[in-house]
Amino acid sequence: KQEVTQIPAALSVPEGENLVLNCSFTDSAIYNLQWFRQDPGKGLTSLLLIQSSQREQTSGRLNASLDKSSGRSTLYIAASQPGDSATYLCAVRGESGGSNYKLTFGKGTLLTVNP
Amino acid sequence: DVKVTQSSRYLVKRTGEKVFLECVQDMDHENMFWYRQDPGLGLRLIYFSYDVKMKEKGDIPEGYSVSREKKERFSLILESASTNQTSMYLCASSPQGASGNTIYFGEGSWLTVV
């Protein structure tokens, strides 16, 4: 059974700092990995999706990397801002075949960026 | 923009009541999902559907059922609500297909069972 772990569970940084969030998964047979952002009391918003054949994806100040063989992904946030404060979750889709699209989520990292 | 709408944001129900949580998506997606999110446990999949009238159990289906009579609508039903079903419920949808498709979430429904 796939398990996804995110470290750290919480992180507090001053504004402007670059930071890295970590995600690891136990079964390397994945189709893709996604990073999501969740604001308090809200749903999830997809930030980046990395295919299993890719090594990284970038969107603005965000860069996500994937090392499938070691079961690891990182989300790099450059020049952090208070508006980046949120919970960040990673999720993997396993190679279960068919048209199903089941994700296994980590429990998230709560990021606070202090002005 | 894809929109996944959960009709009820906040509900308070009594133990034993039948509860319906409704979800509608406007992008003609084949796949729809119901998750619940609890502190310390993360998101857990309750049920999903990959086509009209088709459904599959997720990781925690006990105490829940679902209905998908139309492609755009996926309902979660609590036949007899219990206090341990107090949680945030998230609906999501995605297009059919393999690795390239992202998933879109609604804003969530906070259910309190008293």
Image: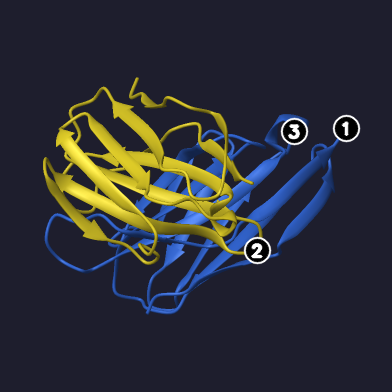
**CA gap, disc 3 to disc 1?**
8 Å
Pinpoint the chain carrying mark 1.
A
Which residue in the protein does label 3 denote? A81
> Is disc 3 placed on a helix, strand or loop?
loop
Q: In the image, what residue type sits under mark 1?
A: Pro
**Distance in Å between CA atoms under marks 3 and 2:** 26 Å
Question: The chain drawn yellow is chain what?
Answer: B
| Left-right relation of A45 to B98 | right
What is the x, y in percent for residue B71? 15, 32
Residue B90 relative to residue B49: left or right: right
Q: Which x, y percent locates residue B50?
A: 16, 48
Q: Which residue is mark 2?
A: B40
Identify the residue at image location x=21%, y=48%.
Answer: B49
Viewer-proximal residue among B17 and B75: B17
Identity of the residue drawn at 29% across and 74% down: A29
Secondary element type, mark 2: loop
Q: Which mark, residue A115?
A: 1
Q: Are marks 1 and 2 in contact (CB under 8 Å)?
A: no
Q: Is residue B16 above or below residue B26?
A: below
Residue sitting at 55 percent across and 49 percent down? B15
**Which amino acid, mark 3?**
Gln
Mark 1–mark 2 Cα distance, whole angstroms, equals: 28 Å
Few, some or many residues within 10 Å of mark 1 (<14, 14–19, 20+): few
The chain coloured blue is A
Mark 3 surroundings within 10 Å by alpha-carbon count, few (fewer than 14), some (14 through 19), many (20 or more): some
Residue A56 x %, y %: 42, 54
Which kind of residue does numbered mark 2 sit on? Gly
Residue B106 in the image: x percent, y percent?
44, 33
What label sits on residue A61 in the rendered view?
A: none
Q: Is residue A71 left or right of residue B74?
A: right
